[in-house]
Amino acid sequence: MKSEATLGRHQHGKSRVRVGRVWRMADGKNVFVEYSVNTTLISAMEHSYEEGSNRGMTATDTQKNMCYYVAQQMKSPCSVEEYALALGRKFVSEYPLVSIAIIEVEQKPWKRVSVQGESHNHGFASTGTESRTTKVEVHRSGEYDVQSGFKELRLCKTTQSGYEGYLRDKYTLLPETRERLLASSVTCTWRYRSIAASFDEEYEAIKERIMETFFGPPKTGTYSPSVQKTLYEMGEAVIDNFPSVDWVLLNMPNLHFNPLHPVSSKFDNDVYFPTSEPHGTIEAVIKRKQKSKL
């Protein structure tokens, strides 16, 4: 009996390749980064699935080793995007059967420390919860796509937030309020429609704009009627201030701080019970308007 099965999309790669890289600068300062790398290759390897032949296959172990090799070839400090592009280009140029290389990199939050009020030459601390991310797709044709962002940036505003006017029925227990604590673990991804002059500077500027929009002015803040509205304003701020960005995806799960009534006293917007389970999850893409063609 002839099989009706046929091979569809196929790929192979290596996940969670951990890379540490130190650049030792002429002025005595060191630059340190730590990456977690995923590689995925789209290649003409139908014969491996259909015939059991591995001829021409770029083994996943080879992919792992290439992550380290390319890191060493970056002779001066580089952005995570530049590293990912170099790695993707290496795969499509080195291996004839590879048509597309997809590189995902998560950069761990190591920051240079200050000691005795002075920036340390070779001292670093892992600070914060957020990680910088990028996903680069490199085609043999020379085309490429760059998406960047961060994950798990924990933000909290202790006032200037409320939630009211939503549908209420017999299943709704949540009380309406114009005074609550708003916290979220923000994951954000944006797509570059043009290459930034400096990926590092663009990343820091976009992240700062997102945080400014979430919090508002230092003295007064900005009132948030919902996570949805604040999320949209954060994405809108990126689109309106960064021409290099095509769209931005924001995912903002709640980090709940529920009001707590201590024994023999009343809640006065002062004591909370932190919990993240269960939590609401709000996500949206804010994109650039398409200009109409005349």
Image (cartoon, helix red, strand yellow):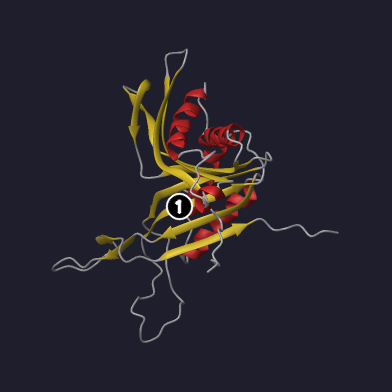
Report whether 164 appears left or right of 144.
left
**From what the image shows, is residue 168 above or below residue 282?**
below
**From what the image shows, is residue 4 above or below residue 183?**
below
Q: Could you say which quadrant of the image residue 111 lies in?
A: top left
The residue sitting at the left extreme is 264
Report whether 25 appears left or right of 99.
left
Horizontal and vertical percent position of residue 125: 33, 32
Front residue of 151/240: it is 151
Q: Looking at numbered disc 1 in the image, what kind of residue is underneath it?
A: Thr
Residue occupying image coordinates x 35% and y 76% = 175
Front residue of 152/71: it is 71
**SS for tag 1?**
strand
Residue occupying image coordinates x 63% and y 34% = 197
| Mark 1 Cα shell of 10 Å, populated few (<14), some (14-19), many (≥20) | many
Residue occupying image coordinates x 45% and y 49% = 219
Residue named by callout 1:
187
Horizontal and vertical percent position of residue 290: 72, 58
